[in-house]
Amino acid sequence: MQEESRTPSDPPGAPRPRAARRDPFAWLDEARLSRERAGLVRTLRHRPADSELLDLAGNDYLGLTRHPEVTDAAAGAARLWGAGSTGSRLVTGSTALHAELEAELARFCGFEAALVVSSGYAANLAALTALTGRGGLVVSDAGNHASLIDGCRLSRAETVVVPHAAPDAVAKALDGHAGDALAVTDSVFSVDGDAAPLPALHEVCGEHGAALLVDDAHGLGVVGEGGRGAVHAAGIAGTKGVVATVTLSKALGSQGGAILGPARVIGHLVDTARTVIFDTGLAPAATGAALAALRLLRREPERAARVRRAAARLHGELSAAGLRTAHPDAAVVSVRAPSPGAAVRWAADCRAAGLQVGCFRPPSVPDGISRLRLTARADLTDAQLTAAVATIVRTAPEGAAG
């Protein structure tokens, strides 16, 4: 049959013509149309080096990303150690600068040891995949960040998702489990800016012999005495069974992440965590910048309180204007929108008026409700806060007030 299918001009052994293959990515077009109909298409916007917009969208809570001490430290580290770390932490990616940052970060937050990695996302993946596994149990808050959710999936442990900020539900999930168990939560949730009940969660975990992992990305630099974080403020930093992760890209104005905990936990991560073993170490410039920002915060602890005051003012004035605004426990202020499309238009109208705000829509919001997400900063002036509130209220779409 193969010989008969050739044309007379085909040489012996020539391959037969094949039918046109199906486009393997044809489904992407329909998927995009579906997102367009739901108002969920996202766009990358390249910000200029010196934007004229008032920024209430970024996570530079302490206003340090352009501070001369921080940028000078970044430049100095790059000149001394090079532009990149050149390898994983276990090969050539560790420097004395990394060790210095780890020691000071652990001491500042109240933990025995710390391990710096390339991002906060990588820190959560490292902690979850190395501290649990098959046969173990992870109890995860329904409002947790995507990096924690992905860490749960990759851990291969049984994962039970419990209602948001519900210690009783965590206790119920832990009841009767005989193996290793880990409860995981954000300290300050990134969507509404509310705080987790850490003391109650710590108590539940202690009663059940479970460990507690807290992502303190939005607490470090903002919450607690001098910005030492929500875990420190709850009085559980450095206690048995508690591990925290942080990011260096928010309050510290740099990039990277870290895991904080008992020394034996950190040693275990070095031996087993894939985002430590196989990922390139944090670049020296980012490491130097984070260390300089941490030292600046220790010298100027009042920056943390200024962030919280700015967030409280945004919440109070927007609520007084009739907008549905969640009470902030740190720097994040959430303002609900009537629909995904309305949220996108609201954010665009704010931008056209000179104000940059965040726009959160499904699937970024676990409750499916679209929002403007505002982030307070320590360096915002009274005039800037007044202008921001006026712009948000003036551009609010129909149905935003509640």
Image: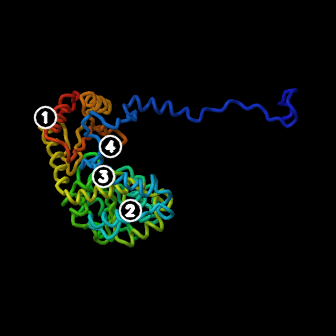
Residue that mark 3 sits on: 70
Which residue was labeled with disc 2?
Answer: 97
Amino acid type assigned to the residue bearing label 4 in the image: Val
Q: How far apart are the alpha carbons under marks 4 and 3? A: 33 Å
In depth, the one of 239 and 197 nearer the eye is 239
Q: Which labelled disc corresponds to residue 321? A: 1
CA gap, disc 3 and disc 2 = 14 Å
| Residue at image mark 4 | 365
At horizontal 88% and vertical 26% (from top left) the residue drawn is 8
Location of residue 401 (image quadrant): top left
Residue drawn at (43%, 60%), measured in percent from left and top?
A: 126
Disc 1 + disc 2, Cβ < 8 Å: no
Label 3: element kind: helix
- Position of 244 relative to 401 (above/below): below
Would you call the spot at circle 3 few (<14 residues within 10 Å), some (14-19), or many (20 or more)? many
- Could you tell which of marks 3 and 2 lies nearer the N-terminus? 3
Looking at the image, tell me whether mark 2 or mark 4 is earlier in sequence order: 2
Q: Earlier in the sequence, mark 3 or mark 1?
A: 3
Question: Which three-letter amino acid code belongs to the residue tagged 2?
Answer: Leu
* Front position in the image: 256 or 244: 256
Quadrant for residue 373, please give it. Answer: top left
Say whether marks 3 and 2 touch (CB < 8 Å): no
